[in-house]
Image: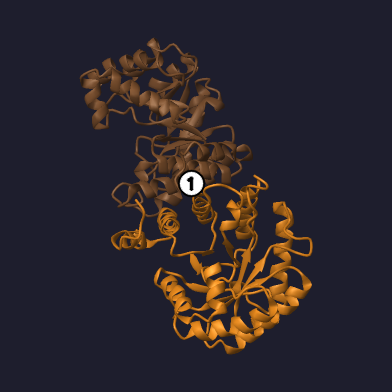
Chain colours: A brown, B orange
Amino acid sequence: MLIVAERINAARKPIREALERKDVALLLEEAKKQEAAGAHFLDVNAGTEAEEEIANLPWLVELLQEEVAIPLCLDTANDQALERALAVYKKKEVMINSFTAEPHRIAGVLPLAKAYGAYVVGLAMGTGGIPESVADRLRLVEQLVRAASDYGIPEERLFIDPLVVPIGTDQRQGRVFLETLKEIKEEFPGVRTICGLSNISFGMPNRRLLNRTFLALCAGYGLDAAIIDPLDRELMSVLYAALALLGQDEFCMNYIAAYRAGKLCP
Amino acid sequence: MLIVAERINAARKPIREALERKDVALLLEEAKKQEAAGAHFLDVNAGTEAEEEIANLPWLVELLQEEVAIPLCLDTANDQALERALAVYKKKEVMINSFTAEPHRIAGVLPLAKAYGAYVVGLAMGTGGIPESVADRLRLVEQLVRAASDYGIPEERLFIDPLVVPIGTDQRQGRVFLETLKEIKEEFPGVRTICGLSNISFGMPNRRLLNRTFLALCAGYGLDAAIIDPLDRELMSVLYAALALLGQDEFCMNYIAAYRAGKLCP
């Protein structure tokens, strides 16, 4: 499973403050620690205020791409910030997170994804928000897949995020997510799946337990990539264990290496 | 998910010793603690030496049935021990663990299961041992289901154990187990599934992490009952979380109650 490291996100107060005072040391440390912990992509989110984001996202890209070997995942809903960030990005691989089934998001993101040969994340939401049922989500997934194809983006560059809705607001939503995942794997075998986890536990007590248990369930249903904090030892322990149990870790070598390195919880 | 509490098993040294010296206090404490922790059945295993088992299993049944409200699960491969234990058993519900697809096990166990109206666990193994592939296990499951039906045991009283084989000896076996589980649910929707967990991690480091992650995966694939230690706080935390995430815990009430009672790991 691909790990997209989530900690450099301006929604987190330490990152927001580090961006404000251009605290290069803190940001680089966050990046390097996540790379060392096994991340495959480094998610970069520079906030949601347009002007700041348009300035900060390219700045972060220039800063981070020199210092980490893994590719970046540009996490923005602002086309202008995305365009400027891509313009200064020098590595071969890049991920764009994200577009939706809304026409203006498709038209804003997919031409850039095509031009830069980027991986791109499509969210299963449209003008009407996030649908409640599996069937309605799949209809949106179909639109996302068709849109990517229309823009000449090969299937293997598309990641679909079925979108996690809190079980605290609707207890069926964990199951809806997993069933959607299963259906996507069956109907679009060439497309990969991705998600963030923490929304599942919003409003519930003991969120980290729910999040890491959900990660195991998602792995069992074939999730290809997860946007997670690779410094969360309990979470990573569950991921190592799940991949070994699911036959996705040859001879359980990664699990055993993680154990020997003292990375696993008992 | 039904919890079959596994601690009263003579394979565990404290229990073996307690049986030898007829330490009623220790055995009752083990029983009551497991009942209090939420067990639905109390597994009772009096060892594998024929003479001792034939004496100890009925003794344990007489001792325990008076002191716990939950039904017992008679865990034996000895027909004589089983028959004597059933003869002294007074409660309405009882589970027999287990028979196999071997003719002498079918002929030894199923008439007793029928006579006592017991739930009965069928293991997916035959004269050739445990098959490696999903298809071969399913052939055995079919034999188990047919045998139960032949003896007039209703489907809802049959539990199938697909049998856990260590990933340390064959890394595909976690996946084989889960796929077998899925196929059983599809082909025999009226039959329930059960398993013990700990064999999955045999020979691997950090076994408890693997076991509890496997429990989450099994829950995701629809496992109906698990033979586990309900006093294992980490394991039970994962189970509460998984059931809430899978929509099997109405309004997440059990999860929240467990949290409020201080039962959940952070």
Q: Residue at x 54, y 60 (%)?
A: B223
Give left or right: position of A266 versus A251.
left
Considering only vertical position in the picture, is B132 above or below B32? above
Q: Disc 1 is attached to a residue of which chain?
A: A
Considering only vertical position in the picture, is A209 above or below B115? above
Task: Locate residue A230: give its quadrant.
Answer: top left
For residue B225, say whether it is visible.
Answer: no
Give how far across and how far down residue A122 sits, in percent. Answer: 44, 31
Give how far across and how far down residue B207 sits, in percent. Answer: 53, 51
**Residue nearer the viewer, A155 or B43:** B43
Considering only vertical position in the picture, is B237 above or below A258? below
Q: Residue at x 62, y 73 (%)?
A: B47
- For mark 1, does the 10 Å Cα neighbourhood hold few (<14), some (14 to 19), or many (20 or more) residues? many
Give left or right: position of B160 versus B259.
right
Residue at image mark 1: A216
**Residue nearer the viewer, B250 or B134:** B134
Counting labels gives 1
Give how far across and how far down residue B143 sits, in percent. Answer: 74, 67
Give how far across and how far down residue A96 sits, in percent. Answer: 42, 23
Q: Amino acid at mark 1?
A: Ala
> Dot 1 lies on which element?
helix
